[in-house]
Image: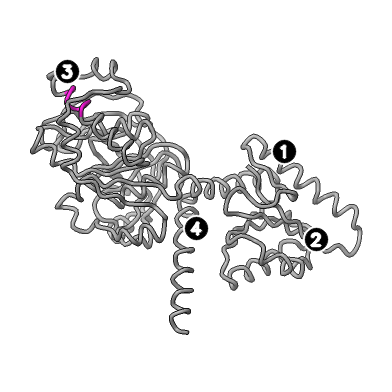
Amino acid sequence: MKIKLYRLGNYLSNEDNKKREADDFINDINSSLFDDDIQLDEKVKESDIDLDVVFVETGGAEILFLKIFNELKDNILLLTHQKNNSLPACLEIKTYIVDNNKKPYFVFAPKEDICVRQIVSFVSTFSAKREMDGANLGVLGKPSDWLIASHVDYKKVKDIFNFNLIDIPYEEVKEEIDLHKIDRVPHRRELENKWKGKKEDLLLSFEIYCAIKRIINKYNLKGLTIRCFELLKDYSSTACLALGLLNDEGIVATCEGDIPTLLTMFLIKHINNTSSFQVNLSKMNFDNNNYECLFAHCTCPLNMLANYNLTTHFESLLGVAIQGELSLIDCSIIKINPALDSFFAIPGEIIRNGKESDACRTQVVVRIEEEYVADIFNYEKANHLVIAYGNILYQFYELFDSYYSKYQKTLQMKANEDKH
């Protein structure tokens, strides 16, 4: 992937030595970036993604920056080696960028290897945006009746993220299920070996999975959410296994028609190319300065589980659900709010898997720091949350902010036009 590189230096003395230092700095960075298939290139006409890199080599580069500003993309990554007054020049340039309605990002680490990690993180953000651009996300049926605060504005989803929310009637899902057609089912033999209930119940879950897959192919969906409790009334079954399989194969899928959770998981998927887990916050234990939360649901992606069994859906004791064990690892707990203007995000540590009889099937106990307890109660995040492996809070912030700041800029420009 080629990223357009602009180099700005205003050399007044020791020109050869200082230029050689700057050359070595960029060469070292590009050598390390090679493994990530990224190169900073002055000769390329324009970047492969919506990001340009400006290497500020010296003080006094501000005047040179003005000459190229109008040809730069809306997102500008400022790079400094912190020599020859390049850092203060960067700070001046950064303020100018903000004042002129573009978005600056700052890479300022003193060592090339740290700079490389920062560059990769920013490039990954904008690569994710390119991959997600114009994605179709299906809403199979409407949100469940109890999600009274989880509805979203479809136009706002389009305006902010450029995702297309496609309403697909539940009757169409039902028609596909009624074909009783089983196509290819991933992990089928393994699933059959793990299921101890009636064979016809597992086959029905396979039929539900395959019905949803056919709808995915019909509408070219990259993700979906389904009003799954209708399946209990019509088939005495659920979509739990289907959603676990879909997320496992990279198609982001949520239950209960929860669109904010779908959007959250869709962004997470494109940050680190891994699945995430839609959960209920089922219990909290804050005794003796030990802050623990039990999260649970019946739809965990198989590729997040160290081990799993198949059982029934928790509330109904029907269908086929997933009861699994997650890895004991640092995690992130995230949720875009239904207004789409902010998100809840805290770090945690998965310390054990749960076995509670009065919670959904796959359960994890997550330890959080005391400082985040108030956030759980005070942030308007609605029902579900999302658990992702690792601390991806900063990457999620950068990705969300790149969308929302552009949306705000568009609104401001429209407001200014309306005044005139």
Q: Are marks 2 and 1 in contact (CB under 8 Å)?
A: no
- Residue 196 tag number: 3
Q: Earlier in the sequence, mark 4 or mark 1?
A: 1
- Circle 4: residue type: Ser
Prevalent SS, magenta region: helix
Q: How many marks?
A: 4
Pair 4/3: label in front: 4
Q: Is residue 149 above or below residue 21?
A: below
Mark 3, secondary structure of its residue: loop
Give the residue at mark 2.
9
Give the residue at mark 1.
31
Q: Quadrant of residue 339?
A: bottom left
Mark 1, secondary structure of its residue: helix
Residue 126 % position (x, y): 53, 50
- Circle 2: residue type: Gly
Q: Earlier in the sequence, mark 2 or mark 1?
A: 2
Which residue is nearer to you in this view: 289 or 362? 362
For residue 206: magenta? yes
- Start-end of magenta stretch: 202-207
For residue 355: magenta? no
Q: How far apart in space, not on screen, are marks 1 and 3 (Cα)?
A: 54 Å
- Circle 1: residue type: Ser
Q: Are marks 4 and 3 in contact (CB under 8 Å)?
A: no
Q: Quadrant of residue 66?
A: bottom right
Q: How far apart in space, not on screen, are marks 4 and 2 (Cα)?
A: 28 Å
Q: Identify which residue is drawn at 24% across, 52% down.
A: 383
- Residue 402 tag number: 4
- Circle 3: residue type: Lys
